[in-house]
Every structure is written in C-alpha cells, then in structure tokens.
Image: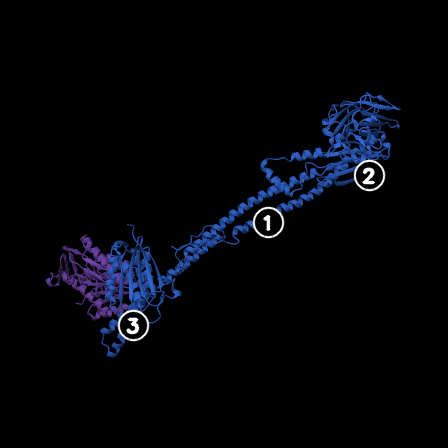
Chain colours: A blue, B purple
Amino acid sequence: MRSRRPRRRFAFSLRTKLLALSLALLVIPWTGYQYVTQMERFLRAAQEQALLTTARSIARVLGQQPELLGAHSAEGGETGHLYVRVLSTPLQLDGYGEDWEPYRAHTRLYGEGHVLSGAADYDPDTLSVQQTVGTRDGYFYALFEVRDERIVYRLPGESRPEASDHLRLRLGATDGDEREYLFTTAAPGWVTVHARRGDGLVEETRIKAEWQETTGGYTIELRIPLSLLGSHLGFSVVDVDGPRRQIRTAVGTRQPETITVASPAMQALLHGAEPDAGRVWVVDREGRVLASAGDLRTGAELTAAGERRSLGAGVLHLLYGLVLDRPADAFEDELSDVSQLDSGEVRQALSGMPATRWRRTPDGQAAVFSAAQPVHSEGHLRGAVVVEQTSHQILLLQNRALEHIFNSTLLVFLAAAVLLLLLATRLAGRLRRLRDEAEQSISADGRVVGRITPSTDGDELGDLSRSFAALLDRLGQYTRYLESMAGKLSHELRTPLIVVRSSLDNLEDTEVSDDARVYSQRARDGLARLEDILARMSEATRLEQALQRSEHERFDLTDLIRGCVAGYRGAYPEQNFALNVPTAPLPMVGVPDLIAQMLDKLVSNAVDFARAGTAIHIAVQDKAAQASLRVANEGPPLPDSMKHNLFDSMVSVRPAKGREPHLGLGLYIVRLVAEFHGGRVRAQTVTSPPGVEFVIDLPLPQK
Amino acid sequence: MARRIAIVEDEAALRANYSDALQRQGYSVEAHASRREALQAFAGRLPDLVLLDIGLDDDVDGGFELCRELRARSATLPIVFLTARDSDFDSISGLRLGADDYLTKDISLPHLLARIAALFRRMEALRSPVQEESLLERGSLRLDVDRLAVHWHDRPVALTLTEFWMVHALARYPGHVKGREQLMREANVVVDDSTITSHIKRIRRKFQEVDAGFSAIETVYGMGYRWTEPA
C-alpha cells in the first residue's frame, strides 16, 4: 500500500476566497447608510416645513383673538419676566416641596447674581434661593427653597421683621400700586403674613404660607389668590445672623418682574396645536413668555421608551448603539424654566419675519429645531409663536431604517456566507476527491494502478473528472499496450520465423552444396537466437495468462527453496550459493511452480551480476505474518535512475553487451509472481559487502 | 498406396514448406488455405490425417470449427493441430474437441514428421495384435509404445502424444529426476517451462480421473519431475 500524501494546506483555499468575496455584501449597509442620511435631510426639511406651518397657523389663530395675548404686552423695560405655568396636580400647602416635583424643570435659582445686599462676603452656602411658581384653581402658588446654614426665627414679642430670617414679597399692579408682604415666623409651621401699610404691618389673611425646616435651610410654600396678584412680582429672602440679629445677606429680584399667568383659554388653544415631543411658546413683543405648552423631554422620553425591545434583539441593539447616533433618553433643556425668549429666530420673528433655527442642547445630546412666526393683529405686531421640536423622531426613524438595513444585510450576508461556504466545501471536497483519486490511480513508479470513477455531474468539475478518467483510461491502455507489447510482438514475429525455420528444415533435406550448408547452419544459429528472444518475450505474457488459471495449494516454502537451490548448484556449477532457511517448515498457500519460477529469475539475475568468486546469499525469514525472501549478490550497485521501474516490463539495467539477450522481463516476472501472492518486491543496494539485495515479502496464511 | 495427409494452413509459405517436407516422406499431400476450401475437398473422401491451423485468415477459430466437423464425421481420423497459438487455453480447447495432438509451430520439421509417423504407427498397431516387446510395465502402469496407449490399473488413460512421451520418459527410469529440458526432448516438443508444468498437471489430472490416489509423478523443485513407484 502506498502511503497517502499528507493533506495540503492552501494559503488561500477556495473557501477563504469565496468567503472574502461574500464580504462584498457588506457594501449594502454602507449604501443603506448613504440612503438613510439622504433621507434624514429630507425628513428634516419636512419637519422644518411642518413646524413652520404649525407656527403659522397658531399665529393666525392668535392674531384673530388678540384678547388672548393680554394687556401687559404693552409694557417694556429692563425688568425680568416670570411666566406662571398651570400646575396640573393639586398642591397641599404644607411647606414641603414633594408635590412640586413635576415642576422642578421650571425652578429658578437665585444666588450669586441676585445678591441684593451683603455681596461683599457672599457665600452661596450661606444663602441661595430656589423659586418655583405655578397657578391652579385661581391661586398663585410659590415655593421658595432657601439654603441657609442657620435659621434665625423671630423672637416672641419682637415686632421688627428685620430681626429674623424672612421673605419679602412685592406685588405690583399695572397702575404702579405696589404692596409688600413679609413672611416671617417664630417656629416652623403656619406663617402669619403681614402686609406693609405705611410704617406699620397689617396681617394679611388671604395669603397663606407654610414654613418648614430642611437640612441646610428652610422652605416657604405660599398661596396667593390671583386677584391679589398684579402685573409685577418681586421678592427677596433676607438672612439675619449674629447675636445682634443684623441683616447679613439678601437674595432676590432687583426689580419686580412682570408676570404672566397662563390663561386656560390660551393653554387650551396651544394644547391642541403642539407637535409630538415638541413645545409651543407664545411670546409678547419683548419675548416674554405668555404661554407655553408641551415638553421637549416628555416626548423624548416617550419615544426613547418606545425603543425598548426583546432580549434577543438587545445584543444587536447594543452593537448598533456603537455605530448609530442614538437619541438620548435624557438631555438638558435650557429653556424649560425660562420666562423670556431671546434667541435669534425669536428676535427675527419679533421684527416681523418668520425664522427657523437648528440648535443643539447645551449638553449636546439632542438637536432642537425651532420655528418662530410673528403674530399680527389688526396690523400690529403683537408677539410671536415659537414651535420647537427635537430631531428625535427623525433620528428614531433613521435608526429604525438603518437597523432594518443592517438586520436584513446581516441575514443576507449570513445566508450567502453559509451558502458560499457550503458550495466551497462541496467544490473543495470534490476537487480533493478527484485529486486523491488521481494520485491513487498512478503508483509511485508511474504505473496506472487504478481508475477514476467518472463523475456524472454536469459542471466543469464533473467534466474535469470525466476527462481525467478518460485520460487515465487511455494512459492505462497505453501502459497495458506497452506491457503486452513483448507478447504481441513475439506472437507476430512467430509466423515469419516458422516460415524461415521450416524452409531451412526443407533446405537441409534437399541436395545442397557444402557451402550452402554452412550458410544454412549460420541462418539456423541466427534463428535459434531469435527464437530465444521470442521465448523470453512471450514468457511474461504467458505467465500473466498462467496466473489467471493458477490454483493455490498449501506447500512448505523452505522445502521448495532448498530444492530449488540444490537445482541451482547443479545448473551453475561455478557459482557459490549460501543458503539460510529456518529448519522448521514454513507453510505457505500459493502456486509453488510460480514461486520456483520467481526464484529462478532472481537467482539468474544474481548470477549475472555477482562478482566472480563471491557467493549468492539466499535467505528466508519467518516474520510471523509474512515470509521475507532475500536474494543478495555482491557486485555493482543499482543505478539510481532505475530504482523505481526496475520491476517493470522491458526495463533492464544491464549494459548492452553479451550474447544473451536481455529484455528486462525477468524482474517483471518476479513482480508479477510476488504480487499474485499478495506480496511485495523491492531491490536495494547494500554496502557491506557492496552489492544488491532483492527482498520479496510474501504473506503467510494465518496459523 | 501413399497415405493422404491434408494440410489446412492459411500462410502460403508454410503450407508449401510443410507440403514439400511431407511429400518428400512419400505422403500424398493436399493443402487448403481456408475452411471452406477444405470442407469442399473433404466432402468426397476423408484424408488419412489432417494437420490443422487454428486461425485461418479472418476465420479466427476456423481450425476448431473444422476439427469439430471432422470429428463428427469420423471418430478415428487422426487430427493434429499445428498452430502458432501456444496458450494453454487454446491447447486445452483443441484437445477437448477431440484432436489427437496439439503441436505448436515451433516444432521442427523432423520432429513433426516423427509425430506424424508415430500417429500412423498407432493406427497400424491398433489394427494388429499387441507386441510384447513394445510394452513397458512399471507397477500399475502399462505403456504400449506402438499404440501409444497408457493403462493405469488396467484402465486406459487418454493421453495426447506429447503427454504420452512425457510419461514414457519419466517412467522408463523410475526415481530419476527428469528436468524440463529432458522432458521436452523426449516429447519432441519445444515449449517453455510453464508449458511443461501445465502438461505435467494435466497428466496428473488424467491419471487422477482413473485413480484418485495417483501420486506417482513427483515434483522436485528447481530440478524437474520423477516417477516414483508406489510403495
């Protein structure tokens, strides 16, 4: 058996190539991305258009209902503005800030920039105020959360409000009439509110307030009927410290701010009009907020929440998160607590021209588009409508599209890769099979020993396999032709030879001169040589035929060899033979005559090459499963070029000389006989003593 | 009256050579090149002996066919195959068809003539009483050299001429090893070693058909064969 060649590893196998090719599919998501960014531009343009349209329609409605815009819009000035939003949940007036949580977005901080007195040694830790306001059911509510490291309460009996920490509230009417209210208490709980009247203080019962201590300060929650509320509001929180109870710091509004209380009618109007995840502002000519509806963030949170998905998709989702610009769940909305709008587009709208603007939130998490539209009423510019919306919707849409593209590409890619892999594996497998078949069908010495089963597949590989099979068949035919050449040739030469010989026989029977007899004898000599050659040539063919009919029998190999060698000693009297066979019989199953014939050839070969005076060694070894027969002679080594085909038909390594014809069929016969018995032959050059050794391994029957 | 020998041979030169040689021996020879021609000639009267080639031009097995037809007409007509085909298969086929001998053309003319003479002698002998001096007896074996007949345990063994001469060569000096060369010489045939081997095998088989325990022909590996007297 020939050893199979080790499996070859290819640097670039078919599979690798096809897989690399399938990577081309990854262009799909790239083109998809291009398409989606294109789409994003369109969507943004559409969004701008939609917001502008919304702004325009609201502006038109407002223009037709100028009373909604209120009266204070005429007033201008340097003062600030406070927009009082509607509180959607009922409040409990208890001095605690919990129920204000939903409105924290509108909380304003008064600190360093709002120090009214005692600025020299101001420390935000000693005093700062957070103000949150709102309106509900005809009341104005306010929450003041004061940060104060030490609370100084009013001493019992102390009439001076300045001698303790307190809140001053100034309410001003449109006509300039202003009232001041003082909030001070001796202990946490209900606060008695005093209104300043001239130089004295009058208790005001319509205003309710509650004072509670917190860690690091206190809160004042108060409620004022809207009827008491004027057009302006100002406050200051005064911190009193020290043993002498002096005013240390005051924080608050420098000037009373104009206030706008959201009107339910306006709110109702806007509520229907605000876009999804958007906000509508109505501002007066100064940019002061008159009404607003909607929230950028609620929308964002809603849409972000809509993104939640199953666990399986979660992994992919995370992966896409690395690639895609994901809408932020939370972002900073710098306009949530403002009461006045002063951005470019608003200013432009207030100058009479509609305007749009894209802006990023201060933390860069979201892009916001705003469209501002002036409101005209009776030919006068009365204010502006501003509609805002984040790009989250678009981003979501875009992401969804991209994810779709990525997902389907991934699927297509996987499917294509698997298919290509299968195809490549199958092709490579068929190629390998073909290669193995091709390699196994030709033996190491170049003989055709097998066939390729022609594939029935209709493709190029099948074609290749078929042409390989045809090629091998032709090659095999040619080899067989060559091997049978000797037999054929001898057969063809026979008849003319017989003609010559029978003619010579006839010639001898007739009266011929002595001269002619000499020539006839020479012709006979030549004829004899020719016949000898022919006999040798046909020997192999005859043997091949004989092999087909031979019957196996059980015989003793040592006995046979001993007998044969005895014969050789008679046949080659000048030649020395050294015999080494085991004494125990070596039973073998085969054709003894053929084995003897094989031995004849080996010995004849050895005799021809043996150096004069040296012995030919014939040995048999019992190697359990097989008998190893060696015939060795001292003499010239085997030529390297002939090592592999020494046992082929018509191969001879003998120098072209001598009278005996050599056709190189002897060792071919040896091989035929050995292979017929399931054995192997090999020839090797040995070094000590220098010579050649033929080894025939013959399998022995199982004992 | 000269014996009539028919030669069926497609090769003109060989036909002429064989005819000449036989005619010189005093035989009357009629030569035919094809089966058709031979059959036409045989239609009237059969010759005394027929030499047949197997392949007759395109008629690959023409000789076999002819042999079958002749044997069908006469059970005793001596038929000898003389052919270039030397495979065992052909010789077995030829002998099965009832040929008296199967010779390859390697045989020299003198050998051929000797064979033919022996055949005629057998024909003669079959018609006359057995001559004691032509008998060779070795234990259970009886060889009648005139009739070329072999008996084992008094039962006839159907050997061809070649086989007969081989047995004769072995049995004449029991115990002596006869090499293949010697056997060839004795049997007047020129064949290679393996053919001798198959001849010996066939001889053994024929004896074994008569006596299953036959083992008188012993192989001496590397040397040849010898006749051993059964103990």
Q: Chain of mark 3?
A: A
**Crowdedness near tag 3: few (<14), some (14–19) or many (≥20) residues, C-alpha within 10 Å:** few
Are discs 2 and 3 both within one chain? yes
Residue A135: percent from the left, percent from the top? 78, 26
Residue assigned mark 2: A347
Residue sitting nearer the eye, A645 or B22: A645
Viewer-nearest of labels 2 and 3?
2
Q: Is residue A619 above or below residue A655?
A: above
Whole-number angstrom distance, CA of label 2 to CA of label 3 = 131 Å
**Crowdedness near tag 1: few (<14), some (14–19) or many (≥20) residues, C-alpha within 10 Å:** few
Secondary structure of the residue carrying numbered label 1: helix
Residue assigned mark 1: A24
Quadrant in which the N terminus of chain A is drawn? bottom left
Residue assigned mark 3: A526
Residue sitting nearer the eye, A511 or A175: A175
Name the N-terminal-most of marks 1 and 3.
Answer: 1
Whole-number angstrom distance, CA of label 1 to CA of label 3 = 79 Å
Q: Amino acid at mark 2?
A: Arg
Viewer-nearest of labels 1 and 3?
1
